[in-house]
Image (spheres, grey):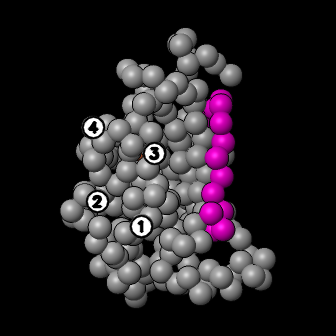
Amino acid sequence: MNDANKAFSSRLGGITGIFPYEAEIKHKLSDLSNHFQDERLVKDMLSRGENPKIYDVYELPQLATEGSLNVGCTILHSGKIGSEYYFTKGHFHQKQSTSEVYVGLEGEGLILIQDRKGEVACMEIKPHIVVYIPPNTAHRSVNTGDSRLVFLAVYPSDSGHDYESIKRTGFAKIVAERDGKPVVEANPKYRES
Ligand SMILES: [Fe+2]
């Protein structure tokens, strides 16, 4: 594929959301086993050999140098673990001053954006919507629809990913199906840092 120091273009759409791409990162339920509320259900599913795909990320060429940008396309599959919709792990950036932009391409969902105090902003994402994710916030996407959620992410190449901080506390909010509709609720397992 292309050298990240040279101009290139990629086409949006298709199975991978963007093509061509350089790297593909797949996440199955076993990769998020401690993230969902119903840990017992996850354990039972995995012990039965049920390990559904949760989300895939397709990345364009990346540099880890200041001033360059990374572009990735996330495909978050549709489904639930119990009543909780599929979501991405969520992360802070290691370089806390860095922000990010998401552009909705297919499907519908919510982006949970949580600051260091545990305050959560909940933004809708779907085609024709751009979501700005401010610095020093953890961000997680949730697919609340019955088809895949696809969005493009653009972020500074040197931002890095910190998955551990938010994994320790969890997000303060969860998104669950109640009476057939997505509802944002307080996370009973949330641990203030
Ligand atoms: Fe990010």
Q: Nearer the viewer, mark 4 or mark 2?
A: 4
SS at mark 2 in the image: strand
- Is label 3 within 8 A of ligand 1 (CB to nearest ligand atom)? yes
- As helix, strand or loop, the secondary structure at mark 3 comes to loop
* Mark carried by residue 114: 2
Residue under pointer 3: 161
* Dot 3 alpha-carbon crowd within 10 angstroms: few under 14, some 14 to 19, many 20 or more: some
The amino acid beneath tag 1 is: Arg
Question: Is label 1 in contact with label 3 (beta carbons under 8 Å)?
Answer: no
Mark 1 or mark 3, which has the lower sequence index?
A: 3
In whole angstroms, how far apart are the C-alphas of marks 4 and 3?
A: 12 Å
Distance from the alpha carbon under mark 3 to that under mark 2: 15 Å
Does 127 sit above or below residue 29? above
Q: Position of residue 8 (x, y in %)?
A: 56, 17
CB-based contact (under 8 Å), mark 3 and mark 2: no
The residue sitting at 58% across, 26% down in the picture is: 61
**Bounds of the magenta segment:** 18-31
Q: Residue at x 62, y 80 (%)?
A: 42
- The x, y position of residue 178, in whole percent, is 39, 85
Which x, y percent locates residue 158? 42, 31
Is 21 magenta? The answer is yes
Residue to which mark 4 is pinned = 97
Q: Earlier in the sequence, mark 4 or mark 2?
A: 4
Residue lying farthest front? 193
Q: Amino acid at mark 3?
A: His
